[in-house]
Amino acid sequence: MTELPTGYPVLAEADVVLRDGSVCRLRPIKPSDADGIRKFHAGQSDESIYLRFFAPMRTLSDRDIKRFTEVDYHDRMALVAMIGDDIIGIGRYDRVSDHSAEVAFNISDHYHGKGIGSVLLEHLAAIAHSGDLKEFEAEVLPHNRKMLSVFSDAGYQVSRRIEDGVVTLHFAIEPTAESLSVRFAREHRAESQSVRAMLHPGSVAVIGASRRERAIGHQMLKQIVEGGFTGRVHAVNPDADEILGLQAVASIGEIDGGVDLAVIAVPADRVTGVVVECAAAGVRTLLIVSSGFAEVDDEGARRQQEVLRLARDHGMRVLGPNSFGLINTDPAVALNATLTSIIPKPGFLGLFSQSGALAIANLDSAARRNLGISVFASAGNRVDVSGNDLMQYWVEDERTRAVGLYLESMGNPRKFSRVARHLASNKPVIVVKPASASYGAPPGHKVRKPKVKPHAFNAMLEQAGVIHCENVHQMFDVAQLLVHQPLPAGRRVAIVGNSSQLAALCADNANERGLEVVHGPVAVPTEATAVEFQAAVDAAFADDQVDSVIVCFIPPVGALDQEVVEALRHAASRSDKPCVATLLGLRGVDDGGDAAFLHETGDFPDDAPRQAVPLYAMPEEAIRALAAATDYGQWRDKDKGETVVRDGIDRWAARALLDRVLEEDPEGRALTSDEASELLGAYGIDVWPRYEAATADEAVAAAEAVGYPVVVKSLSPLVRGQAMLEGIRVDLHDAQSVRAAFEALDRRLAPMDANYFVVQRMAGPGVSTVLSTIEDPLFGPVVSFSIAGAPTKLLDDIAYRIPPLTDVDVREIVEGIKLSPLLMGYDGAVPVDRAALEDVLGRLSIMSDDFLELSSVELNPVIAHGSGVTVIGAEVMISPATRRIDTDARSLT
């Protein structure tokens, strides 16, 4: 391996999905790229060369090459975009002043239209912004419209000046709401397109197709053929002439017309060679069902990483390895690239699973419930394509109404939160992540171990509007309601049954789950006719005060009367209110002989039901699903707020402080009291000063500096338990009391070496709170809020949120703890100034999002009172920056 040049920023390397769904590699330039630069330049047209250099430079001199390839990665930075060994784009900036740099790009003529210039700009701006640069400028010829659009479409506020026939552009590179919106929209389009290429292939090749019926390759090919795939199917096997009626080829390179999806089913030690062949043949996407990778041993993990690197270097996306496969039930595709022929009917639920065994269980459960699916994918070891990618696709997939994901691990929760929130704003997202998987991962899954408590994961799902279920059974309970019924408009429900005891049980269960019973519970007589039952159900639907209807019917003679079923269908199908039903222990979707599905495809009789009714074996299951749907509906309807912004923030002062400290202590350390105050002050958070005191005279001087009344306390780490009560003296009003308190503490704690004291002004009455952030290896920055003291620790009463926060997130984190009534004026107390408390929380969240060097920040205590807040203590730990999983620029992780 070639030795990297001095200062080479490895963290700037990234794989990026381009506009057409293919992948390219971004990395900092190296002196060894000289020949690659010459080849790139030689392949450019005269026009492209002129637009870049303002001159007809047909060849580059050795001096030019040296200047282009040798940079210091600070004042001069350059990135190259690569596919394989070829450079397809170059972006660079050169510092021209203290906080400004000139930026320029050159994109291969053969790769225009893929968004490479936009990607390079995005990454260069992120690199520059992480340092001390504030602004980019660029010089562009007026007729270079493509490059002008790269800047104008990026979401920055660009100013233009034309002088001597050249357009000079200037723009601040601080991320804005508009630039972030552009970035996320581009990321969504590109990743959605890459998944679409995998799910809508025009041609599929099974590599490892076998004549042996029990072989995986044979079964994959069989399901594709017998499933009626509408595209071209190819069998690849060098030792066979024909398989399942298809003419076999010896290698994928022999297939005319190209291959969109290659299904790889060969032994693990042969997969790497097959991927090389696929790259040479121009294959777009790979489905690797082969096992024997990271789930087995370290050698398998090495092989898995090699396969990923090969695929990405040649622009391909990978599902797997160790994948169970994928399904697209769209009649225009009809692709079943799995190992099972028993799949659910076409429908409107998108499914994602990681393990193969659970994939089978998921598909079987959906089929038994009569719950159709749109798309299914199993990620296996999740080396590349993940649930995040599938969610990007589902955002705009018209055939998907709701999404279910079974997650055994999560590689990028920060991005998951962002993408899931986008999807959930229009379609329900239902997630199963077993509690046992909170701090572990299945073999083969590469996951960073989090430091935060599991509650942070639940908070992230709630923040994103995701419906969290405990198991697959609950996921399908919720899905069959959300796919086939309208969302509840509110929490008010009607209950109709033919058993007073069962109806009462339903009412109790509804109340426990936060639903309000406003109609009933109505119990028709056990021997009631279908007409009487329908009248009761019709009355429930007709009640203007009712948002949802719960029906529970137990046939008196053990056989469900078909007239009762028809009565329920009739009532439910003619209302825009959702209905859940328990009928004789049935479970699944009652669609009246596929009537609901036929309606969606256009072949639907006028008098058939308009909605399928979800059925549940037990009322508790129905009500749990209805409560989840109601919670989701309220989340979707509520105001999500605007991203938190605050005046009076000096990011550059904070950046300078962190750089200064890390230059002195490269391994990081805790900030001193003065340094912490300076850092927080740059973000508009004022920390009350405190002074150290080793003698009584120093304590008196400190008290007079901060102003009376004061607190004198010991900060010795040995002071704990009962001794802590003896380590604090409060409400000291004059020099004499301070001196006496200091001397008493010094004598009392001397045997414990507790001679480290501080003096601080005493805060007035209020509620003592704790505001903190942590840079988590998995989640990135996590903000938490709690009331100070033992009750919080005993009850684990802490609220979490993942930045960036909205103003609604900030409000909800304060309201989200059990002890929040203490802030609202509990038991006659004066309510605290919530606006002031939320202001500090917002500033803290912005700071934690800005600097990943902030390992932890704890403001403790923060006294909230009726006229503001007082930040008494602040502890800040910093460490060298590492790379967040969800970076500041588009990147596959």
Image: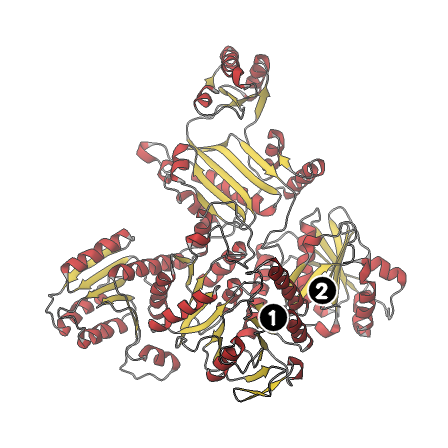
Amino acid, disc 2: Ala
Element marked by disc 1: loop
Disc 2 crowd, CA 10 A, few/some/many (<14, 14-19, 20+): many
> Where residue 81 is drawn, which disc sits there?
2
Give the vertical position of 765 relative to 573 (above or below).
above
Do tag 1 and tag 2 residues touch (Cβ < 8 Å)?
no
Residue where numbered disc 1 is placed: 21
Residue 735 in the image: x percent, y percent? 52, 12
Residue 476 in the image: x percent, y percent? 36, 65
Disc 1 crowd, CA 10 A, few/some/many (<14, 14-19, 20+): many
Q: Residue 697 falls in which quadrant of the image?
A: top right
What distance separates the C-alpha of mark 1 from that of mark 2?
A: 15 Å
Determine whether, in the image, residue 113 is placed left or right of residue 350.
right
Element marked by disc 2: strand
Residue 257 in the image: x percent, y percent? 64, 85
Which of the two residues, 370 or 20, is positioned nearer the viewer here? 370
> Where residue 254 is drawn, which disc sits there?
none
Give the vertical position of 582 relative to 678 (above or below).
below
